[in-house]
Image: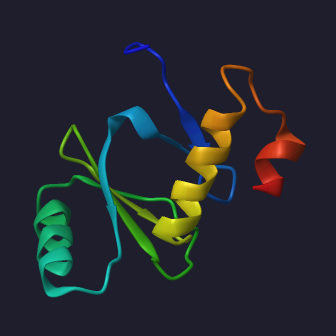
Amino acid sequence: MPGDISLVHVGFGNVLAMNRVIAIISPGSAPTKRLLQEAKNNGMVVDITNGRRTKAVAVMDSGHVVLAAITPETIAGRLMAFRQNGSREMDQDELHAL
């Protein structure tokens, strides 16, 4: 459904609203670094790495850029697992197992 919010655990007790994500990209390329610098200058960066190395950059439909300490592949896998479980909520143990 269009109004459904898919919250996916992205580490350290943080969740990401996947229905608001435009792209999840690796942080290493020059275009990504420019995007990140521009977002920092505009105060649009949300850092959920807990001081760890940034492994994924999520670009949100609001223009915000979210930094995560897990890889884009891991986030995508967790989203797929979440969607395969249907609409039921996952408990804390299931979230941390992903």
- Of the pair 57 and 73, the residue shown nearer to us: 73
> Which residue lies at the image location 54% right of the left edge and 58% below the top edge?
75
Q: Residue at x 19, y 80 (%)?
A: 33
Number of marks = 0
Q: Is residue 96 above or below residue 84?
A: below
Q: Position of residue 19 (x, y in %)?
A: 39, 33
Residue 55 x/y as whole percent: 46, 77
| 44 displayed left or right of 12 | left
> What's the colour scheme?
rainbow
Along the horizontal axis of the image, is 96 left or right of 33?
right
Residue 89's quadrant in the figure?
top right
Which residue lies at the image location 69% right of the left edge and 50% below the top edge? 13
Residue farthest along the right direction in this orientation: 93
Apparent side of residue 52 relative to residue 90 in the rendered image (left or right)? left
Locate residue 59, reporting x and y percent. Answer: 27, 54
* Residue 90: percent from left, percent from top: 78, 32
Location of the N terminus (image quadrant): top left
Quadrant the C terminus occupies: bottom right
- Judging depth in this view, the residue of 16 and 25 nearest the camera is 25
Q: Quadrant of residue 31?
A: bottom left
Q: Nearer the viewer, residue 87 or 71?
A: 87
Q: Residue at x 12, y 56 (%)?
A: 42
Q: Is residue 48 left or right of residue 43?
A: right
Q: Where is 53 relative to 47, above or below?
A: below
Q: Quadrant of residue 57?
A: bottom left
Taking depth in this image into account, of 39 and 98 the one nearest to the observer is 98
